[in-house]
């Protein structure tokens, strides 16, 4: 694991600075945080700290990084890189250390005093002489190129020397530091406008993912894997649109009814000539071919009977009713027994176009299955949707570490309660959000075990009527994490009211924590959450609760 970095994609003054930051990040533990280019402004002017490291149990390091060739002559530091100039790296680091302390002292949310800290100078392209000595810089304060590979160890050792001055920051202190330095609260008076701006920013990031499809245009069979918030659903729709616009007959399918309805509504916004021939669930495709509908409670029908019948029927379909290409979203939901029917639906089963989008971390159903044909694997390494605070709660549950680009937001709220009380507590939390000004259609209340009574009541009217409520603007949406994969809301209240089976509980918690874009409220028993999700999830949730 590596430390979190803020901002997610920092700019650097030089390649030397960039290489030092990358090396240091890889050496730090995952609970450490690395800030780049922190600017402080006060009456004495502007100062910028090249690197600030916040390390639980160790301390805070403020580092001035100087590239080129750096030397000390007659008490004066010099930097040579094309031309020689006098520099003051120790003074810069020291002033930034005190600027950070002053900033925290004035910050309304910081109440922890001065954390243990020290200043350093990093010279990633300079080798200091063996007899190096500077009046303003003891040797342990300066990290040269021979020490970059173990810079974290040097920093840790130096910070521990100052242990008698101030206490090292706790994990909660570090999370609070993140909020003070990188977090930005959402002003309630401008909440609706801010939500629209956040949505536009996420859309811009997601649309930039189209370059992935550009690179893969010559590959007919691809599996695109990505964690929560990586833009898979948008890419699936975009791929289906492109293929259709090229004149191919395309099926865009998934497993979940809710996601299928979302896909249908998104596709209806496209020009008619770019809409795929079929958009819906895998099973409804078979029913459209003539397979008799089955009961929701008959798992053997959905898992075996219907797919087997679909495969047989597909072989007898005329070519004009089959597809040139099939695009599948949330493909990890597909059982192995379904893939023969998927391939049989292609006009050319052996080499027809097949694009699948998946996230192994969201495999929440007991069934197992992988595509039965070779696919080119492509990884999406970025989270584009969730704020840094929300993404931090589930990052330890994701299959792979992702770069978080969703921007900063408000802290995650955690409301401790017994599992059996989680729905009641979540109801109160949702009412509080509505009172704060959150629009009803921006809010969802999700459960992890038994369904909310309102969801049960709405589903009694039928699945189509129930999922139509997802787009209602006069009330919040009530759902279960099993049916909410691929969907999102600006604000989510998650009621962790138990799990049907802890065998898939970790995956279900991952789904639940990742459905909110801007604000996440979690209600549940901390011991249960820790047993399922691990200490990292507990630490992030309780840190957010402490800050409120």
Image (cartoon, grey):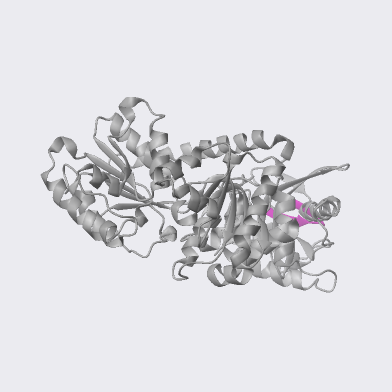
Q: Residue at x 35, y 51 (%)?
A: 255
**Is residue 250 visible in the rendered structure shown here?**
yes
**Image check: 133 left or right of 51?**
right
**Image check: 357 left or right of 303?**
right
For the N terminus, the quadrant is bottom right
**Is residue 123 visible in the rendered structure shown here?**
no
Magenta residues span 69-78
Q: Position of residue 209 (x, y in %)?
A: 45, 41
Q: Residue at x 33, y 29 (%)?
A: 274
Vertical placement of 114 versus 194: above or below?
below
Vertical placement of 258 versus 539: above or below?
above
Q: How many marks?
A: 0
Residue 72 shown in magenta: yes
Q: Position of residue 3 (x, y in %)?
A: 60, 61
For the C terminus, the quadrant is bottom right
Residue situated in front as seen by the camera: 270 or 484:
484
Residue 267 shown in magenta: no
Q: Position of residue 42 (x, y in %)?
A: 85, 43
Vertical placement of 77 versus 434: above or below?
below
Q: Position of residue 91 (x, y in %)?
A: 81, 53
Residue situated in front as seen by the camera: 448 or 290:
290
Magenta residues: mostly which secondary structure? strand
Q: Residue furthest right?
A: 43
């Amino acid at each position: 694991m590596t430390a979190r970095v803020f901002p997610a994609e920092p700019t650097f003054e030089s390649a030397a600075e960039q290489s030092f930051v990358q090396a240091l990040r890889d050496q730090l533990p995952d609970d450490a945080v690395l800030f780049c280019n922190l600017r402080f402004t006060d009456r004495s002017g502007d100062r910028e700290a090249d690197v600030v490291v916040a390390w639980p149990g160790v301390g805070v390091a403020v580092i001035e990084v100087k590239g080129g060739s750096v030397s000390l002559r007659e008490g004066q530091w010099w930097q040579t890189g094309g031309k020689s100039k006098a520099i003051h790296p120790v003074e810069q680091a020291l002033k930034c250390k005190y600027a950070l302390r002053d900033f925290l002292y004035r910050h309304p949310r910081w109440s922890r005093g001065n954390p243990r800290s020290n200043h350093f100078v990093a010279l990633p392209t300079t080798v200091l002489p063996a007899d190096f000595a500077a009046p303003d810089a003891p040797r342990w304060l300066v990290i040269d190129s021979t020490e970059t590979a173990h810079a974290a160890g040097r920093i840790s050792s130096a910070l521990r020397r100052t242990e008698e001055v101030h206490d090292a920051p706790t994990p909660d202190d570090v999370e609070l530091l993140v909020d003070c330095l990188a977090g930005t609260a959402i002003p309630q008076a401008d909440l609706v406008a801010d939500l629209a701006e956040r949505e536009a920013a996420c859309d811009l990031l997601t649309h930039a993912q189209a370059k992935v499809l550009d690179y893969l245009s010559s590959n007919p069979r691809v599996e695109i894997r990505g964690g929560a918030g990586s833009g898979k659903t948008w890419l699936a729709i975009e791929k289906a649109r492109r293929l259709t616009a090229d004149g191919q007959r395309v099926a865009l399918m998934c497993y979940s009814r809710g996601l299928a309805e979302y896909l249908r509504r998104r596709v209806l916004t496209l020009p008619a000539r770019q809409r795929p021939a079929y958009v819906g669930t895998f099973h409804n495709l078979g029913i459209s071919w003539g397979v008799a509908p089955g009961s929701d409670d008959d798992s053997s029908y959905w898992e075996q009977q219907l797919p087997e019948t679909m495969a047989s029927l597909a072989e007898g379909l005329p070519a004009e009713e089959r597809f040139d290409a099939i695009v599948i979203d949330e493909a990890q939901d597909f059982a192995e027994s379904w893939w023969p029917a998927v391939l049989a639906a292609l006009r050319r089963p052996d080499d027809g176009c097949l694009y699948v989008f998946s996230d192994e971390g969201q495999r929440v159903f007991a069934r197992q299955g992988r595509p039965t044909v070779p696919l080119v694997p492509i990884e999406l390494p970025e989270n584009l949707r969730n704020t840094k605070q929300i993404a931090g709660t589930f990052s330890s549950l994701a299959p792979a570490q992702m770069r978080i680009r969703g921007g900063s937001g408000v802290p995650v709220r955690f409301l401790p309660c017994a599992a059996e009380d989680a729905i009641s507590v979540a109801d109160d939390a949702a009412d509080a959000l509505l009172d704060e000004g959150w629009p009803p259609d921006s809010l969802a209340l999700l459960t992890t075990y038994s369904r909310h009574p309102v969801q049960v009541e709405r589903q009694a009217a039928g699945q189509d009527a129930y999922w139509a409520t997802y787009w209602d603007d006069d009330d919040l949406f009530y759902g279960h994490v099993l049916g909410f994969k691929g969907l999102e809301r600006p604000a989510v209240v998650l009621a962790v009211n138990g799990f049907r089976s802890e065998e898939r509980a970790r995956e279900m918690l991952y789904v639940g924590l990742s459905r909110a874009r801007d604000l996440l409220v979690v209600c549940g028993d901390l011991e249960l959450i820790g047993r399922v999700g691990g200490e990292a999830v507990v630490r992030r949730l309780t840190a957010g609760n402490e800050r409120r």
